[in-house]
Image: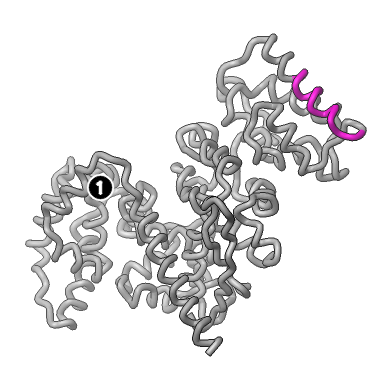
Amino acid sequence: MSNIQLGLKSCQTNGGTSSTCTPLANPTAAQPSSSQSGLPNCAANYDEAIAKIEAAFTEFEEEKADIYEMGKIAKACGCPLYWKAPMFICAGGERTGFVSVHSFIATWRKLLHSCYDDASKFVYLLAKPGCNYLEQEDFIPLLQDIVDTHSGLTFLKDAPEFHSRYITTVIQRIFYTVNRSWTGKINMTELRRSNFLQTLALLEEEDDINQITDYFSYEHFYVIYCKFWELDADHDLFIDPKDLARYNDHASSSRIIERLFSGAVTRGNSVQREGRMSYAEFVWFLISEEDKKNPTSVEYWFRCMDMDGDGVLSMFELEFFYEEQCERMEGMGIEPLPFQDLLCQMLDLVKPECPGKITLRDLKRCRMAHIFYDTFFNLEKYLDHEQRDPFAVQKDLDSDGPEPSDWDKYAAEEYEILVAEETANEQLREG
């Protein structure tokens, strides 16, 4: 970690509600149709909602609220606290620096006429005019407000260069988890099926943002950014295939890395054309690499291995990736399993519906996709799986209780390592 100053900075508070956070010192509205918007409320509820808002505005001078005072208005509307920035912007507050009671009620009346549940209201507030979906940039004002006002991120006030990095990370995690259609546009159905709005609501109850491991954890951001920084030798916020190959000491095969840069799992042509991966794209890679049980990860690696894009992993494609694993094992003095024997193992593991053809559905159903993928392109993890007791693997699958995800475990372990390394470096510097 010599190329980056981690600059440990404590944000511990009494009562144990906050943990040590570690900022890096120097890295560099839509109107959806009623059919999509839930069920309508009765007129009495509508009038009562407007009356509560009017009463809340009487607390402010000239009945005008700035962005910080909008928190009270959000609560009067029956919405989570951190809806306040989108509400402020949707009602025109960005132009004048405040929102009057009249402009807000006009906005809220329009919303109530067409939006009857949280998902439809949220999309209305954040989306561009005429759109009934959310794109990545639509989340920026919401997340900037969280950075500016959440008590668990107060230490970032002195590190504005980190704001955009943290926001980029959270946006990628939102789309990674919620946008199951891979369109780059989150629709209301996806929002309803996800836990995002419930998680966003938790932010006002939890001072330690690291306890919110889904989407918002600063420690998770820290781990992702440090991993990227280690690979990004010239610190231009892009990495090439050689840089990425160094991740985890060249554990991934060159053939899978080539596929990562082929455009199979990225949007736009920049990765293919320039052979560069952005920080945002690295977020997807890292979560997919370290948690191959995640449904998005299963699809991410399927797209990489499905070289002809026909929705099926053929025996040719499997042999293509396994061939390099064999070469690497032979170089280490390990005798690899012949491909035909390995193929029998993998087909027995996945049990595809159509014999000899493995589909994405097969891999999601079998719950062993992580073992399958590591076999074909991550030698270190493949050898680890080979040495594990098969009964232990089955025990993991049969576990009933809510277990932390592989990503949560990885992020927690790596964060402790990074903090220990930086503490040791500080002690050396201090002599």
Can see residue 269?
Answer: no
Query: Dot 1: few (<14), some (14–19), or many (≥20) neighbours within 10 Å?
Result: many
Q: Nearer the viewer, residue 318 or 415?
A: 415
x, y percent for residue 323: 20, 71
Can see residue 306?
Answer: yes
Instruction: Name the residue furthest front.
Output: 14
Q: Secondary structure at mark 1?
A: helix
* Amino acid found under the numbered disc labelled 1: Leu
Looking at the image, residue 360 sits to the left or right of residue 4; the answer is: left
Looking at the image, residue 106 sits to the left or right of residue 287; the answer is: right
Instruction: Name the residue furthest right.
Output: 62
Q: Is residue 375 magenta?
A: no
Above or below residue 43? Residue 29 is: below
Instruction: Name the residue furthest bottom.
Output: 431
Q: Quadrant of residue 260?
A: bottom left
Residue found 50% across the figure and 83% down from its top: 427
Q: Main secondary structure of the magenta part?
A: helix
x, y percent for residue 423: 49, 76
Q: Quadrant of residue 258?
A: bottom left
Above or below residue 121? Residue 222 is: below
Residue found 25% across the figure and 52% down from its top: 369
Residue found 58% across the figure and 74% down from its top: 7
Q: Nearer the viewer, residue 321 or 79?
A: 79
x, y percent for residue 244: 42, 73
- Number of labelled discs? 1
Q: Is residue 55 magenta?
A: yes
Looking at the image, residue 31 sits to the left or right of residue 402; the answer is: right
Stretch of the chain drawn in magenta: 50-61
x, y percent for residue 13: 58, 56
Residue designated by label 1: 363
